[in-house]
Image: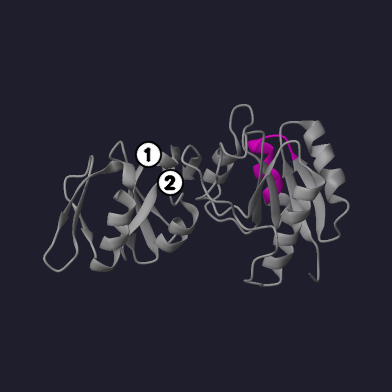
Amino acid sequence: MTSPLRALLVDDERLARVELRELLSEYPQVKVVGEADGVASALAQIEALQPTLLFLDVQMPGEGGFELLARLPERPFELVFVTAYDAHALRAFEVNALDYLLKPVHPERLARTVARLAAREQGKREPVPGTARPKLAEGDMLFLENGAKSRFVRVDQIVCLCGAGDYAEVVMADGSRTLSSRPLKEWESRLPERLFARIHRSSLVNLSFVERVDRGLSGGGEVYLRGLAAPLLLSRSHAAVLRERFG
């Protein structure tokens, strides 16, 4: 990297900011240019300092990290979440976060984050060893960003996902639908294989919501899901896989 990333630390805990600043001092790729203890001060600092990297606490008194992002329609910075949640309790999938760090931040884990930052800045597409995004688990929480209706959802409450070009529509058990900017292929790579299966090039389903499968003469068919009025198409190429999963 020709010049260091200009980092802003946003955390209501002063000691947490001090510790992270000290850890980051080991990396010339990152220069801490400011700190903020809440959403209001973060907005002011972002405008004044124009950081290129944000270390953002998820949970803060009053408004938290996601409320801050909701006020920033444009984000000309890399984003790393810092959270006290268990690693399996929060996956900020829909906010284009580069990574997340679990409190207390461990030096080895921070090193992987900085390596990913360096790779991103250098325009590399190959994964950095040890930094691949982990698979989601059934009980994980996702943050689905959809304007004012953004919210947390459980992975196992996703009924299906339907491809829409470079986007995917996420259908939940409560009937809500959210258009995700993540393509179906990326969702498939992250969702737990035990629970989700591709049934068509344009759809991915939660097997626990499958009520019945009607076979067609051509070898494909239709898949009926609990809570959905209309069935989804089952392609011939995916029918055998589905039979095997239910077998």
- Where's the N terminus, which quadrant? bottom right
Where is residue 122 drawn, in percent x and y? 71, 72
Sequence-first tag of 1 and 2? 2
Q: Hey, which residue is sitting farthest front in the picture?
A: 247
- Would residue 39 be visible to someone looking at this image? yes
**Could you tell me how far apart the alpha carbons at marks 1 and 2 are, in whole angstroms?**
21 Å
Q: Which residue is disc 2 drawn over? A: 147
Residue at 66 percent of width and 72 percent of height: 124
Q: Is residue 3 left or right of residue 127?
A: right
- Would residue 171 be visible to someone looking at this image? no
* Mark 1 nearby-residue class (10 Å; few <14, some 14–19, many ≥20): some
Rendered image: mark on residue 157: 1
Type of residue at label 2? Gly
Q: Quadrant of residue 11?
A: top right
Q: Which residues are magenta?
A: 36-46
Element type at marker 2? Answer: helix
Q: Is residue 153 left or right of residue 5?
A: left
Residue at 71 percent of width and 46 percent of height: 45
- The residue nearer to you, when weighing 103 against 195, is 195
